[in-house]
Amino acid sequence: MLAELCCKRRPGLWRMLAVAVFVALLGCLRAQELRGHVSIVLLGATGDLAKKYLWQGLFQLYLEEAGKGHNFSFHGTALTATEQGQEVVAKVLESLSCPKDVAPARCAELKDQFQRLSQYRQLKTTEDYAALSKDIEALVQREGLWEAGRIFYFSVPPFAYTDIARSINSSCRPGPGAWLRVVLEKPFGHNHLSAQQLATDLGSFFHEEEMYRVDHYLGKQAVAQILPFRDQNRKALDGLWNRHHVERVEIVMKETVDAEGRTSFYEEYGVIRDVLQNHLTEILTLVAMELPPDVGSSEDVLRHKLQVFQALQGLQKGSAVLGQYQAYSEQVRKELDKPAGFLSLTPTFAGILVHLDNLRWEGVPFLLMSGKALDERVGYVRVLFRNRACCAQSEQHRAAEQSACLPRQIVFYIGHGVLGSPAVLVSRNLFRPTLPGGWEQVGGPPGLHLFGCPLSDFYAYSPVREQDAYSVLISRIFHGRKDSFITTENLLASWAFWTPLLDSLAHEAPRLYPGGAENGHLLDFEFSGGQLSFSVQQPEQLVPGPGSAPAPSDFQVLRSTYRDRPLVTAWPEELIAKLADDVEAAAMKAVRRTGQFHLALSGGSSPVALFQQLAMGHYAFPWAHTHLWLVDERCVPLWDPESNFQGLQTHLLQHVRLPHYNVHPMPVHLRQRLCAEEDQGAQAYAEEISALVANSSFDLVLLGMGTDGHTASLFPQSPTGLEGEQLVVLTESPSGPRRRMSLSLPLINRARRVAVLVMGRLKREITLLVSRVGHEPKKWPISGVRPVSGQLVWYMDYEAFLG
């Protein structure tokens, strides 16, 4: 009654009382939350990673959180026997250090507290995990606490993950209301298939939100600063962070050490799997991703990172340059007991050219580089901006803040090198950046130069207090910040991007280099279009052993005959250059004769190098007068990666000025159906050819030859398209996508000129076979290519011709 009376007479007072009660209850709940107990279990607690970084990271977490009311227990575990493990852990705990701003007496007190909260136990069987769980529950009950959660840090080899995960899931999960976080160290698989298998295994024991895959580069302070920097400088960067202003992005991690003592690991993984597939790719996503409105939202950040993977253009063999320091094979022979003549193909250096297929970054090269036994230890991300200025004032009078002629760049300096510490550098002629608390503007010693500029040309910032990457990440694990870790979806997307390149490079011999400063310019590389190549030829003394394979330059383009028709043979680079010259000559001749050049092109991997050569090296080519047709097409949408037209678009069309109405893709996708007979796509293409190409006679048709003797999409044991009046036909391939559309053999043989390009060692057997057969197109469709009044020329590289 009193409350009711008060409510009626003094409603404001009643509201104030309600708020006070609510605040008091909330305070009680928060106090209870702070009384929550967190158990951290370090698996592999006696290993190198744990001794060097993880125990120190856990101590740092304790320093940051203990004063805030959190309760902890730290359980070091391993397969090591209890007494021996306790000795190892005791030494590690004694060696822990405090930040410089912590007084020695206070540091000693905190270390003592941490040591009393830390223990070692052997953990091998499921029963051991069950005993650990009971001990944690007893500790929580004894202290009058409630269990907030458990963290299991897997500092163990990946082959042990599944068994440990099974034991945790069955015997050591926390009770209802408490969270579980399991922390996983790379490598997360060897390729897409193995990563998928590991992810499936772990997913059967843990939920996605419970798994934290560590890439320690995401904890390095300069890397962790990329998104906050972009966020706090949105206004300045909005107009700059795109293809119109960025010339290129370099993501680099160089090491002076070699792989000695680690060749067992390195032989299995190599530099691409060890560094580029994870560390450098993760950094690329931070630079290239669309910035979400709230960079503090883990969910939004992870979603935007995944969009970057979806925009990455596929890598080709020509997207990479590989190197190996000279002593590596000898180290492998010694450490892995290999025979005296063993030569490893594992790269210890790699440069990779990456492009993104989206509006922001189209055409901007992202250069990823890493290697061992190089001239310096350094890591950085460098965003170099275009410079279109031409300055009348002499260089010595240019002011860094005002001159548009000085280089414009933003550098996230990860560490080591001439600076020796993390930093963010912004050219003074760009803008004065804003950085969050914890970073301060710094100077440098006079005369210090970075990336072609004195340090004084930059606004330079460094962290007030340097932190180890693992300390940063362990803190984020504790606070549940998933955006600093690798989700299953992003992991598999990364492997899907890298695995095809790794497969294509598996048998490529890397360039040898001596190591250190002696490398000189040997590993310098340059890019043109989608291709990378070393800038200087390899000196002869670096080719291993006597009697090694001759260099391509030792041979000239050779002319001969094959099946009684002209044959051009050469190494791949010279062969493609010759074919490109011949295509341009045919184009010029046709344009002079009729004003138009009708060129029909095959798909597949062999012509890619030709497309790139035509796009990047033939500036006099009469593209404005050229009509492009397809020899064959897979029955997939034109935007599908399997589409021949998509390959043509990627490697040629987007790089040349060809009128869009002169491009003639095959109509395989009509009325939302693929190659349906009733849609009459083949007939429509034939009618288009008859209407535009005089006498349906192409000026040049480029063909390939399959290992089964097929050409275009005309296959053995199938009569379709080998004879008759049809100009364009639908066929069936023995392999997927099975349905195809193809020019017929009679139409191909009407051409003024037919070029057959055959490349690679896998073609050697069919090349030899076809050289001996007559006109048998039903068995070997390529043998039916005989232009009625035109010329047929074969182009073969040495591997296809000689094996």
Image (cartoon, rainbow, N blue to C red):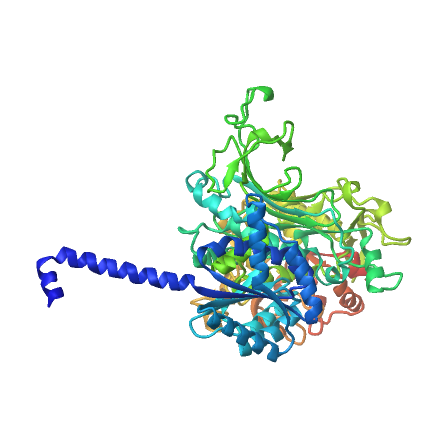
- Front one among 674 and 486: 486
**Please, which residue is most extreme toward the right here?**
546
Q: Is residue 495 visible?
A: yes
In the picture, residue 649 is in which quadrant? bottom right
Please tell me which residue is depicted at 66% across the width and 40% down the height of the picture: 417
Q: Is residue 702 visible?
A: no
Image location (x, y in percent) of residue 667: 50, 63
In the rendered view, tell whether residue 286 sits above or below residue 200: above
- Tell me the quadrant of the picture where the N terminus can be found: bottom left
Image location (x, y in percent) of residue 714: 63, 69
For residue 387, side relative to residue 449 (left or right):
left
In the picture, residue 19 is in which quadrant? bottom left
Image location (x, y in percent) of residue 741: 56, 67
For residue 786, side relative to residue 141 (left or right):
right
Image location (x, y in percent) of residue 514: 81, 46
- Front one among 680 and 68: 68
Q: How many marks?
A: 0
- Tell me the quadrant of the picture where the C terminus can be found: bottom right
